Image (cartoon, coloured by chain):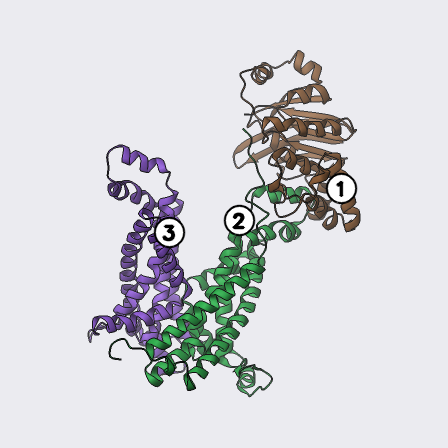
Amino acid sequence: MIEFRDVHKFYDKLHVIRGIDLSITKGEVVVICGPSGSGKSTLIRLVNQLEILSRGDILVDGQSVASLRSRSLRQLRTQIGFVFQQFNLYPHLTAEQNITLALRKVLSITPKDATLRAVELLERVGLADKRQAYPAQLSGGQQQRVAIARTLAMRPKILLFDEPTSALDPEMIGEVLTVMRDLATSGITMLVVTHEMGFARELADLVVFIDQGVILENAKPSDFFLSPQHPRTRQFLRQLLSPLHTAND
Amino acid sequence: MGGLTFDWIGVLGGAPLEWLELGVLTTLYVTFAGFLVATLIAIVLLGLRISEKQIIQWPAITVVAVFRNTPLLVQILFWYFAGFGLLPADWRAWINDDHSWAMLPGGVGLLTPEFLAATWGLGVFSGVFIAEEIRAGLMAVAPGQREAALAQGFGHWRCLGYILLPQALANAWQPVVGQYLNLMKLSSLAAAIGLAEITYQVRQIESYNSHALEAFAVGTLLYLAIGMVMGQILLRCGPRSGTMIRGGIRRGP
Amino acid sequence: MGLDFTVVVRNLDYLLWGRLAEGELGGLLLTVIMAVSAGALSLLLGITLAVIAWRYAAIPRKLLFLWAELIRGVPLIFVIFWLYFLVPALFGGGIPNALSVILALAWFSSAAIMHSVLAGLQALPCSQYEAGIASGFTEFQVLRWILLPQALKNLIPSFVGLFASLIKDTSLAFIVNVPELTMVASQVNSRTQLFPTEIFLSIAALYFILCSVLSLIARSISNR
């Protein structure tokens, strides 16, 4: 489904992704973790080409991402859902319009069908009563749930999450994780960058640990948490799981 | 003049009153025509300026720099004395002909060199500033907005049209209204090429019966009143920004 | 179309400094002198007004804002008219036209300067004020030695930008027959009749060079 082949990314001289090989099969839920600045966000942003590859290639459904331009790139992006850390809802549109806009303008779905889909998805994320609310009138957790609904509305084959709970107050993390848990068991392919180790332990098929642009550990959650191989992974887990650890980063 | 005594009848009666009425109409017409030209120019410049290609951006950057860094008066004089002369001869002859159909209500000629040069000069000058205000509003839109749109499969122009520009316009509306009001006030410079708007008429009254202070007072009030009405209308018509409070973003702990 | 700039070359000294030899200042030189004097005056006036508005937040600030709003609502030409006619009427005549234009420009821009200096003062963290008071300064001393220096330093680029606007605005002095650059250029134009393109392009270039150099300076200061 997604295959990273010797993927590299440079920002000028800064080498942030240094040769990543990774294979993800259909329906898998993969959690990517690592210290901040390790390149984990860059890695998933490369999948839908929000960042441009410097070297190597990523295959999505056997199709090379590096060679895609304009129209075919846009088409690929409609099939890959992306959930941002800062939600990035469109502030000038209501929750419902946030969901229907791309349906109508990119996928050319009729306004009526688009609205139906929006209503259905807002219900699914538990926000049926917030159709007419503007982003500024919603809490962080609600905004992120609308953002997830907006992503799902495009019926993507793959979902990418970039630290979806890191910008949230602690009491709102739960409601977003509930929605994500629901998705993880639905059989969709998911690539999740997160510090929520509970989510990883419970739902991931694979946990990938990245540091300084390289994969140090790639294992099933049971192995990852019980017998990590690399000393840096052990250190990372110790810090993250220690009670003195301060929330995110 | 001899001290400060006022005689309002010398301004608000007889020929001066008629001149003032004509002046107000002319100011309104040239402002409205300039408004249309400015809007058009702003759209074109903005389109060039935010294109993805450098080669297309450059002409727009040059135009903006030239018109921002020279006085509007010089620009108007240029359009009137030089620009008009650069038009093909038969166009000039046609413009100088009598056109009864181009007579606006109140007897203001639309197709005169003065009206055209003033409209064009004001329009280009203000258009440049308006384009820059909107571009500044565009820069103020959070970068995540563009990314979200791209991730949903929007292309460059659709992303601009549906996501970025509505927010940019709401951000920039107040300064844009300021620029339109400026256009109205700057139409006073058209007096220099003999367009018979308010400022021109005020000076005419001054030389006709030396009622300078009274005429200036009336002129000042007229500009203030037009500006107030125009500002209210434009602010009402503008994009509503009430519901989109800055940043739909709440930061975590 | 061929352009013939000999008319500009022949009148170059007139365009640059007017009839300086006969003791009558004009042209570009007068433009610059007027802009510099108006700039200095408006800084002085604008900062003073900002300090008053900052210190007396109640009625004086409201009155100053109203005054600035009125100034902004009227075309600059009218501000020039008013000073041109009012100053002699009030003080018994006899001031040169150029001076009344300088006063009008200073009057006009001081409103903008007042607003930006006040905003600059208000943007400073109030801990600065408290720290000053805590170390025993009087209110005025805090303003003079702690707040204003910081606020004004941040505002230097916008002052440079304002100076560029003043250079352009001096062209409005034509309305009261001051022989600055635009005025002498239109005199040359109406005397020769044949070369409007060359003449106006040339003086536009002069203004352009002056103003873009100023805006480059402003940008490099604010990037520092």
The vertical placement of B51 against C134, above or below, is below
Coordinates of residue A68 in the picture (x, y in percent): 70, 43
Identify residue for label 1: A119
Query: Is label 2 in a helix, a strand or a loop?
Result: helix
Query: Circle 1 sits in a helix, a strand or a loop, which is it?
Result: helix
The quadrant holding residue B72 is: bottom left
Tint applied to chain B in the drawing? green
Residue B237 picture location, percent across and down: 58, 60
Query: Residue at horizontal 30%, vertical 51%?
Result: C52
Q: Which chain carries label 2?
A: B
Q: Distance between the residues labelled 3 and 1?
A: 48 Å
Q: Colour of chain A?
A: brown
Query: Which of C222/B221 is in front?
Result: B221
Alpha-carbon span between mark 2 and mark 1: 33 Å
Rendering coords of residue A210 (x, y %): 61, 24
Q: What residue type is labelled 2?
A: Met
For disc 1, the neighbor class at 10 Å (few under 14, some 14 to 19, many from 20) is many
Q: Please give the letter of the chain rendered in purple.
A: C
Left or right of residue B117, residue B237 in this image: right
Residue at coordinates 57% horizontally, 86% vertically from top-left? Answer: B99
In this figure, which residue is indicated by the disc labeled 2?
Answer: B139
